[in-house]
């Protein structure tokens, strides 16, 4: 079974909140991705079946949003915000530093599968720029040394 | 009915239509009123994404997109003023920012809306210095279509087509913003019965068909209006002709028949016209079994001689015609007259059947099966049964569809006859059992009319000339009738006269002669 019973019932609970089934698609994708780490084609098909839409319509949504992954990536999602306020506060240099530190380019995963490094659009934490998101946690007011240490602490 | 004014001209239009739809209904869109557009298509839902069709409407401060703005009584629209043209120029500049401008190697060049509108509204220089977005140049979308990501302007016509017309929905826009790209679901190619239409509706060179790609520059092609002969639907097509060769079919719009689409199978059937297995000349079978190439006159004399023998021995009523559902109404009318002149009722037709759908594809795999019925040709089975029973001694066989429907048993039946004359366009087993073989023209090589499944009579004109001596079935039978000295078969072959006689004597064709059939055909009359 592609989607576990627990996730399936959580999806049904989300669907119940919306006047149209499709309204719960984003919530469902979050739930499924939490369980699987990414949205594989067969997972998209299973979701499409639940929502009575085409699998390709699920993929439209998956590929539209940065937070959904259409291929397996590292265990930890490290996303540095590079929108204007963060960039003014050195975010682009920060990305560059982290690229060198990890030996990968933004958009790539470390060979050990530990970290996927990437850019992120505004996460609404401009007052604490520059910032990054690691999985579901924000790290703010960063400087290069701090950020490297945080990455090193990831398992 | 709302009245609208467009560039000073008034139109009374239907309620609830948008400006582009209303102008299309009037038949003036791009035909007097030129509002450039990419994403809008008359047979697809409205997208409103390309922004090129902006027009000025009096009383509305901002320009509006004509594709998605409903008409209102008294609306005054301007499509050509400075403001509108400035907006188009802006849209074109944005659309061209990432366009690769690889027109010299693009197969769409010459029939590309991006080229046309860039020529009309584009600025002659780029204001950007940034590198153009790079993309994949040859994405294999499926068995029929190749996709160039760089040329795509994301109008989504292909996406909507797949969802709304065949209903298969293989295509979609993945990602967003300047990363947006048309894709298929992983491992599920673009593969449906109508897939190649996406290349027609692609306004740029992003989607091209594998079949036609790089065969010829389109500006060398002459578009000859014609009818697809793949099935009984009679889809209207343009035959793309150059060097006396048909390079492709593209759909020709006829809202009463095929709208703006044709099926892939029909589209590819053009290849039959110039196929290697054409019967490229008339033949008389020698006693030793070999086929001797002969002139039409010799073939006719041989055929008449053999028929005379049968008539003398068994009477003219023993001569039958197994008609072809690919022959024109005029050809079939001559067949009918020949039988009438002989006093024979031995007529039949074999129509190959196959897969059909609710959209265009008809079960009968011939363009004029309905015409045969209207001209009195019943099922081949009955005729062949009578032939097996000895009531038919000579059979003039048109085409080889009966081979497909009757199987090898047909050959046995024909071998049992005294005389078998074949008039056909493509080689088949039938040649082996015929004493005389006449090379016939295919629909794309002759004048005539065809009756589609719904009884609509449509006109065909020659798009190409065969490179060998071949004649319409009607002409062959006319000359055969003359060689036999049959009443009514005198004078030279005259298609116009035959057509006139058809219109005058067969009620189903009353008033329909070659000269009077308009480009979109004549619908079935309730008579």
Image (cartoon, coloured by chain):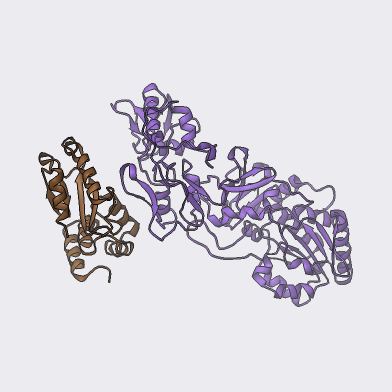
Towards the viewer: A138 or B225: A138
Q: Quadrant of residue A24?
A: bottom left
Instruction: Estimate the x, y position of residue A103 in percent, counting from the top left.
Output: 26, 50
- Residue B512 visible in rendering: no
Residue sitting at 23 percent across and 52 percent down? A67
Question: Chain B shown in which color?
Answer: purple
When the figure is inspected, residue B337 is found, relative to residue B511, above or below; the finding is below
Report whether B44 appears left or right of B356: left
One can see residue B168 in this view = yes
Compare residues B526 and B113 and report the one nearer the observer: B113
Asked if B293 appears above or below B446 in the picture, the reply is: below
Q: How many marks?
A: 0
Q: Colour of chain A?
A: brown
Q: Which residue sits furthest bottom?
A: B389
Where B505 falls versus B68 (above or below)? Answer: below
Judging depth in this view, the residue of B503 and B292 nearest the camera is B292
């Amino acid at each position: 079974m592609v989607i576990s019973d627990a996730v399936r019932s959580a999806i049904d609970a989300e669907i119940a909140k919306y006047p149209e089934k499709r309204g719960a698609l984003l919530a469902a994708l979050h739930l499924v991705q939490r369980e699987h780490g990414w949205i594989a084609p067969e997972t998209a098909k299973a979701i499409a079946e639940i929502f009575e839409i085409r699998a390709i319509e699920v993929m439209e949504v998956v590929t539209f949003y940065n937070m959904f992954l259409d291929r397996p990536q590292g265990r930890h999602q490290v996303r540095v915000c590079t929108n204007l306020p963060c960039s003014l506060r050195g975010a682009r240099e920060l990305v560059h530093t982290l690229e060198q530190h990890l030996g990968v380019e933004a958009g790539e995963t470390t060979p050990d599968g530990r970290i996927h490094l990437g850019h992120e659009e505004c996460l609404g934490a401009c007052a604490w720029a520059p910032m990054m998101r690691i999985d579901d946690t924000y790290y703010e007011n960063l400087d290069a040394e701090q950020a490297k240490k945080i990455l090193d602490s990831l398992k | 009915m709302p009245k609208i004014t467009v560039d000073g001209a008034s139109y009374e239009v239907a309620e609830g239509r948008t400006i582009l739809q209303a102008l299309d209904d009037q038949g003036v869109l791009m035909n007097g009123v030129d509002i450039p557009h990419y994403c809008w298509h008359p047979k697809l839902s409205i997208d409103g994404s390309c922004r090129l069709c902006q027009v000025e409407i009096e009383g509305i401060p901002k320009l509006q997109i004509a594709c998605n703005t409903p008409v209102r009584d008294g609306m005054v629209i301007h499509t050509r003023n400075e403001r509108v043209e400035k907006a188009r120029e802006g849209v074109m500049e944005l659309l061209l920012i990432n366009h690769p401008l690889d027109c010299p190697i693009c197969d769409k060049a010459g029939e590309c809306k991006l080229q046309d509108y860039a020529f009309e509204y584009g600025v002659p220089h780029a204001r950007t210095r940034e590198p153009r977005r790079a993309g994949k140049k040859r994405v294999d979308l499926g068995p029929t279509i190749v996709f160039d990501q760089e040329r795509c302007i994301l109008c989504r016509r292909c996406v909507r087509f797949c969802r709304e017309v065949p209903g298969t929905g293989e295509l979609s826009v993945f990602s967003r913003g300047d990363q947006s790209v048309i894709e298929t679901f992983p491992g599920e190619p673009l593969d449906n019965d109508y897939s190649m239409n996406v290349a027609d509706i692609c306004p740029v060179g992003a989607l091209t068909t594998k079949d036609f790609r790089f065969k010829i520059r389109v500006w060398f092609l002459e578009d000859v209006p014609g009818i697809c002969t793949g099935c009984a639907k009679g889809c209207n097509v343009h035959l793309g002709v150059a060097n006396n060769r048909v390079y492709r079919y593209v759909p020709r719009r006829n809202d009463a028949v095929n709208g703006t689409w044709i099926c892939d199978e029909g589209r590819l059937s053009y290849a039959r016209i110039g196929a290697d297995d054409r019967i490229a000349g008339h033949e008389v079978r020698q006693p030793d079994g070999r086929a001797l190439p002969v002139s039409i006159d010799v073939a006719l004399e041989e055929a008449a001689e053999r028929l005379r023998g049968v008539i003398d021995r068994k009477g003219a009523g023993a001569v039958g015609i197994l008609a072809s559902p690919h022959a024109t109404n005029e050809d079939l009318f001559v067949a009918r007259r020949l039988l009438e002149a002989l006093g024979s009722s031995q007529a039949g037709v074999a129509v190959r059947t196959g897969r059909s759908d609710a959209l265009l594809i008809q079960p009968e795999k011939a363009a004029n099966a309905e015409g045969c019925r209207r001209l009195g040709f019943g099922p081949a089975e009955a005729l062949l049964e009578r032939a097996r029973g000895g009531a038919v001694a000579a059979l003039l066989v048109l085409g080889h569809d009966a081979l497909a429907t009757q199987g090898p048993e047909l050959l046995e039946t024909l071998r049992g006859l005294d005389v078998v004359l074949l008039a056909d366009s493509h080689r088949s087993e039938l040649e082996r059992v015929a004493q005389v073989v006449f090379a016939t023209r295919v629909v794309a090589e002759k004048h005539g009319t065809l009756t589609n499944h719904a009884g609509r009579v449509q006109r065909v004109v020659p798009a190409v000339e065969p490179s060998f001596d071949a004649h319409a079935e009607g002409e062959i039978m006319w000359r055969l009738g003359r060689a036999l000295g049959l009443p009514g078969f005198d004078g030279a072959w005259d298609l116009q006269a035959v057509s006139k006689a058809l219109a005058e004597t067969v009620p189903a064709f009353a008033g329909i002669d070659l000269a009077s059939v308009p480009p979109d055909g004549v619908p079935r009359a309730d008579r």
